[in-house]
Amino acid sequence: MMTDVLIIGAGLAGLSAALACRDAGLDVRLLEAGAGPGGRALTRRIGSGLPADMGGHWLHGEDSPLRGVIERYGLEARADEGEFYISENGVLRQSDEDWLERAIDDDLARRIRLGETPDIPLPDLARDAHSRVWLEDFGYLWNGLEPPLRPSAREFLTDENTPGGLQLTKGVGALIEALANDVGHARIRSHTVVTHLISISDSVCARGSDGSTWLARRAIVTVSLGVLTSGMIAFDPPLSDATRAHLDGMIMGEMNKIVIAVDPAFFRQRRIAPDTAYELLDSRPPHFCHAHSSGLPLIQLYASGQRARQIERLSAEQATGYVSALVRHIPALAGFEAHMQGPPLISTWSSHLFTQGAYSALLPGHQRSGPRVEGPIVLCGEAFDERFPASLAGSWRSGQAAVRSLGETGLYMRQTATV
Ligand SMILES: Cc1cc2nc3c(=O)[nH]c(=O)nc-3n(C[C@H](O)[C@H](O)[C@H](O)COP(=O)(O)OP(=O)(O)OC[C@H]3O[C@@H](n4cnc5c(N)ncnc54)[C@H](O)[C@@H]3O)c2cc1C
């Protein structure tokens, strides 16, 4: 049977697109490689059943479109107002969130924003040698890019993921659950790895690794940039040169987390405020640590680049030792091991076959675009949003935009005619 729209991938972009299709009166089906919806918006349970976000966590940005979405589903969220510390050259000091602003050459930044000066690698935006190290470290930690690769300064200056941000009290999994319930679980087919997408005049045929075949008038592909560029899905005809060139301007950054549940009394006794953040710049390469995360008794350690790959292979004991070595000089956190409630959780996004990295990073001199239309197929996901790139908000927006671009391919008009 031919559906109106097949959606490949049931992460946030796929669920967003499914709801937009439904609102447009289109019949939709989602094919998901994993065991269920969510993709990189994955919440696991730790300790006494606390929600641990293993991928996306913050709903970044004051104007995030997800604010309206979580209100619609009545999901509880809290602003991240905790203390912020930088540990550098063995000295721990409290800072404000403007530390990065102070690292930037304001005049150069203004000219790049206005397009008067071409885009440059982020560290070249620094006002002095010391600031350059900060920006290098930031590109490594935030974008997950291993030097000599560096992210675009223009994107750093213009994306809307900062300032502001919310955290979902029950984790991003609660948002995925609400969306999947709304879409209808019967529309989501899990354990279906799409390997071929064949465009035949005005329709698309998808083939799964289990031999299944699906026909639709249009397809929306939401798989990660890593999956898209790995060749896991063969496109017939192949993607256009313009889209290939566009994909070449981005690279999949790497990031993983170690999440540790601790006795709640530990945070009370040490007087650690909810959402206390530590930028660990004296560890080489640098790390980021979020303690009393979301006001829950959790410690979350973020590792990027090569370290992200390395921590995937650690045993529970080794992961505890890894975090312990990094925070031993932070008096508030030292000795947390004695208060742990069960083994840590470690994310494995680098080796995850259906992700192949954490999220996309834009290379200098390149630009993101919205969803890419390839005949009856539209590509979208976190890599295809200019305002909230590489984020949950960007995934949501790109799913909505993909369905709008289906309208431009004539699908809505015909749909209206049938109605
Ligand atoms: C460690 C980490 C921390 C992050 N922190 C934040 C944060 O704090 N805030 C924020 O906004 N963002 C954050 N992100 C990014 C955010 O999680 C992602 O941008 C977002 O979840 C991506 O959603 P998506 O739907 O675009 O892609 P995905 O979630 O990757 O969804 C794509 C889906 O396609 C499926 N798939 C893949 N291949 C196939 C195939 N061949 N056939 C069928 N299905 C397939 C996958 O299983 C997946 O479910 C983080 C990500 C990571 C990894």
Image (spheres, rainbow, N blue to C red):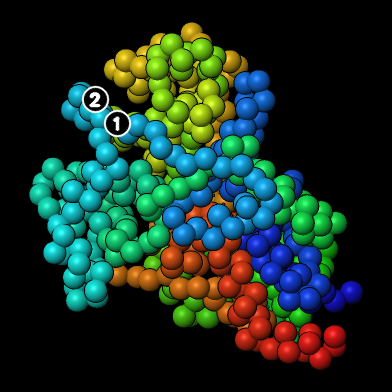
For image coordinates 24% across by 25% down, the residue present is 92
Q: Is residue 273 above or below residue 96?
A: above
Decide: is 253 above or below 213: above
Residue 187 sits above or below residue 269 on the image: below
Q: Quadrant of the N terminus?
A: bottom right
User: What is the quadrant of residue 345 in the picture?
Assistant: top right
* Pointer 1 residue: 85
Q: Nearer the viewer, residue 318 or 66?
A: 66
Report the front residue among 379 and 104: 104
Mark sitting earlier along the chain (2/1): 1
Would you say 117 lies left or right of 292 here? left
Q: Are marks 2 and 1 in contact (CB under 8 Å)?
A: yes
Q: Is mark 1 within 8 Å of ligand 1?
A: no
Q: Position of residue 122 (x, y in %)?
A: 25, 56
The type of residue carrying mark 1 is Tyr
Left or right for 334, reference 208 = left
Q: Which kind of residue does numbered mark 2 sit on? A: Leu
- SS for callout 1: strand
Report crowding for label 1: few under 14, some 14 to 19, many 20 or more residues within 10 A (C-alpha).
some
Q: Residues within 10 Å of mark 2 (few under 14, many from 20)?
A: some
- Return the x and y of residue 390 as percentages of the image width and height: 47, 57
**Image quadrant for the C terminus?**
bottom right
Q: What residue is rendered at 39% in x and 43% in y?
A: 305
Q: CA distance from mark 2 to mark 1?
A: 7 Å
Secondary structure of the residue carrying tag 2 is: strand
What residue is pinned by disc 2? Answer: 92
Q: Is residue 228 visible?
A: no
Q: Residue 190 at what x, y percent from top left? A: 77, 52
Q: Is residue 98 left or right of residue 18?
A: left
Residue at image x 18%, y 49%?
103
